[in-house]
Image (cartoon, grey):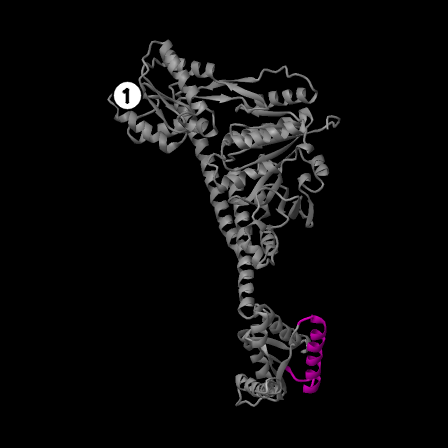
Amino acid sequence: MSEKTTKLIAVCAADMSIDYNDRFFDAFKKHASRFGFKILFFNAFSPLFWQQKHDTGEGSIYRLINPHLLDGIIMLGETIKNDDLRHYIATRANEAGIPVISIEHPVDGCINILYEYESTMRKLIQHLIDDHGCRTINFISGIKDNTFSEERLAVYKSVLEENHIPVEEERIGYGEFWYGPTQKVVQNFLDSSLPFPDAIVCANDSMAIATIQYLNEHGYNVPEDVAITGFDGIEEALDFIPPLTTIRYDMDGTVLRCFRIMTSLLAHKEPEEPLQILSEIVYGSSCGCQTSSKNALTKYNRMTTKLHSRLNDHRHFNEIQIYMAADLTDNDSFFGVFDSIKQYADEFRSDKFWLCIVDDFLVEQEELSDIIDKSNFHRNGYSAKMNMMLSRINNEWQGITDFNTSDLLPDLTNILKEEDALMFFPLHVLDQTIGYVAIAYDYERMNMEHMYHFVMNISNALENTKNHLRQKNIIASLENKYIHDPMTGLFNRRGFSQRVEPLYKKCQENGQAIFIVSADLNGLKPINDTYGHADGDIAISTVGQALSHVSPSNATCARFGGDEFVAAWQADTMDETEFRQKMQKYLDDFNASSGKPYHISSSIGVVIAVPNNSVTLEEFIKFADEKMYKEKVKFHQEHDPR
């Protein structure tokens, strides 16, 4: 692959809801062409932290990666909060002999590009002390024992000690990087007997925003009463009122450095670039800097406009998803689901997309035994072959086709001649893999949160359709068992009645004759007593087979129980003599070739007549039974003269 002028790089990420990823994706696509790179994004929507069934299904997208197609892999390691999956990606790359880089999270087997934020965080806390005169500073860390939480907490303690400010444990709390736990920490600060702090330093922006909101609700103003700082530089923090003072990474610079390092590795050279990237302070007004009311009003107006636009977009999207869910549910086949999805194709947010399904998922007729045996349809990961069920390229629908999963998409080479970046998302329900969606990535049109809901809507619709079809198959199978005799495969009494009653009424109405046969195995008890019940079952089945074989194709043959059989059909092709001759020949042929020490024979009663409206089917069968019993009495008189 090193001979190619264009290099194919996979970028693996998770937790699609965070602004962090959007900014990285934009930077990867924006700068890739400068280095001759094409990008394949493999994205899990969830952070994969909880390791529940849903996370297993999300993480399956990384098992789609074919390192033999690639020149290198880049991981946004901190977004994939699952050590096993990070290790899996790195191992696949190492085994294929291609370079793999992890950004922000160290992973064995990777070139690790890490952020150096200690010096910047020191500078931020020192700014609070030197420029704003803060002497009592509280700290809200993230998750206890988390690497980033503890490292940032250590910097806080170190700076306070250097400035001869006592470290008081009551001024430290763990907000777990999120709103709810942070509010509890702030309430603890308010309830504390210690003096109210001059500043609160937060280990990420989400906790800083939650702190400001909670303090505002309790009568405190920021920065007038207390300075607040964050960390990460997310979009919400920069648009917040007051704008957060925070620490931000240069993502464009990070991607450019990552690409330069990858270029060196592909040329089999040692990277000359440093593997640490510095962060920078973004000064907002939450610490007391940049407090211009005019700037704040302008930012407020801009933020309000943006929020209203997003809210309207979200309302519109939710309305579409409600209608889509209803339309997808209103189907009784997979092709109905795919036809319904076509109506919502614009929700893929791309001019090119591909919807691919594992090759054993779309079976509509399943045997009951296969349905019961979950291993036959429960899949974690991808099949060797995929079915491309939907694809639209520049508003033109493509045909259905199958392809090798290792190729990722049909005709991937030609697709990449026109596209710089493709993005792959998992289709799954819980831990069961259904397939994946691929799109030509367009940063301006993409909304990851909406895509998550859209893709899960498709997954759930496909799984619901499969369950619906399974239920239909189970019902059909049970109905089949309900009306059939398990030993002979013939209809039972119930099945016979369901099929023959309509025929019987038709014959009554049209004055047509019906042919009814009552047959009974001769000598079952001696066979059972002498040779065992297994041979008795053979004898019973043989009579059933004989009856089914010699009756016309439109006949209904049934075992009523024990050794009693009944058959019925519209009388138009066979008379009684012909039927008896065929029946006798079948049994004679069996007896001649079976090697059994006993002979199988049957007593038969036949009635051929136009049924009278006053005579029921059951009564009509009794006429045939009476004839059969007379023949059976004669058989016993000849073979058992006692």
The number of numbered badges drawn on the structure is 1
Establish if 542 lies above or below 45. below
Q: Quadrant of residue 225?
A: top left
Q: Which residues are magenta?
A: 569-596
Establish if 571 lies above or below 51. below
Q: Quadrant of residue 501?
A: bottom right
Three-letter residue code for mark 1: Phe
Q: Quick check: 129 left or right of 533?
A: left
Residue farthest along the right direction in this orientation: 3
The answer to whether residue 378 of the structure is visible from this angle is yes
Q: Quick check: 377 left or right of 225?
A: right
Quarter occupied by the N terminus: top right
Quarter occupied by the C terminus: bottom right
Query: Residue 61 in magenta?
Result: no
Establish if 506 lies above or below 8. below
Viewer-side residue, 614 vs 284? 614
Where does residue 344 sit, x and y in percent of width and height?
57, 49
Q: Secondary structure at mark 1?
A: loop
Q: Residues within 10 Å of mark 1 (few under 14, many from 20)?
A: some
Where does residue 66 sit, x and y in percent of width and height?
65, 35
**What residue lies at 42% left-to-right and 21% top-to-bottom?**
150
Q: Which SS does the magenta portion mostly show?
A: helix
Where does residue 348 sit, x and y in percent of width and height?
58, 43
Establish if 424 lies above or below 209. below
Viewer-side residue, 236 vs 94? 94
Q: Which residue is labeled 1 in the image?
A: 196
Q: Quadrant of residue 485?
A: bottom right
